[in-house]
């Protein structure tokens, strides 16, 4: 069974693979920092942004706590650990899944 989009995002993040992480986004996809600050638009900017985060926090990791499948969107609850002995924090993310294959248990990442 292949991994769904959210599983690939978490795996790439925890492997500190900025290219794989960015590759899960649509070509014109966007990543935002809380609450609404654009962190990157397009795979190159997203890769550069997340690569800088990995460089700043070499032990950072995320654990998926819970997810809700809303059909074409996944809402996830995650726990982030910077790996620097600072307190962990939790966040929720919304991941659009444009194709049925992006839903849990199937397929490839969304493409434009």
Image (spheres, helix red, strand yellow):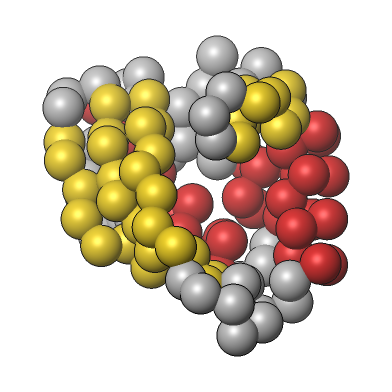
Q: Where is residue 71 drawn, in percent x and y? A: 17, 25
- Residue 70, placed above or below residue 80: above
Q: 28 or 58: which is nearer to us?
A: 58
Residue drawn 38% across the image and 25% down it: 96
Q: Where is residue 24 drawn, in percent x and y? A: 55, 40
- Residue 102, placed above or below residue 90: above
Image quadrant assignment for residue 49: top right
- Residue 40, placed above or below residue 18: above
- Residue 65, placed above or below residue 69: below
Q: 89 or 42: which is nearer to us?
A: 89
Task: Please identify the quadrant where the N terminus is shown.
Answer: bottom left
Q: Is residue 85 left or right of residue 52?
A: left
Q: Residue furthest front?
A: 87
Residue drawn 46% across the image and 36% down it: 109
Q: Where is residue 80 drawn, in percent x and y? A: 48, 65
Task: Please identify the quadrant where the C terminus is shown.
Answer: top right
Q: Is residue 99 left or right of residue 46?
A: left
Residue drawn 39% across the image and 49% down it: 91
Tell me if residue 28 can be seen: yes
Residue drawn 16% across the image and 40% down it: 68
Image quadrant assignment for residue 54: bottom right
């Amino acid at each position: 069974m292949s991994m769904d989009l959210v599983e690939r995002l978490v795996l790439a993040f925890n492997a500190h693979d900025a290219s794989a992480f960015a590759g899960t986004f649509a070509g014109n996809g966007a990543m935002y920092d809380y609450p609404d600050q654009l962190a990157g638009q397009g795979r190159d900017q997203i890769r550069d942004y997340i690569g800088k985060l990995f460089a700043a926090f070499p032990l950072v990791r995320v654990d998926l706590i819970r997810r809700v499948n809303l059909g074409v969107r996944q809402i996830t609850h995650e726990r982030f650990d910077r790996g620097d002995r600072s307190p962990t924090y939790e966040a929720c993310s919304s991941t659009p899944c444009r194709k049925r294959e992006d839903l849990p248990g199937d397929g490839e990442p969304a493409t434009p």
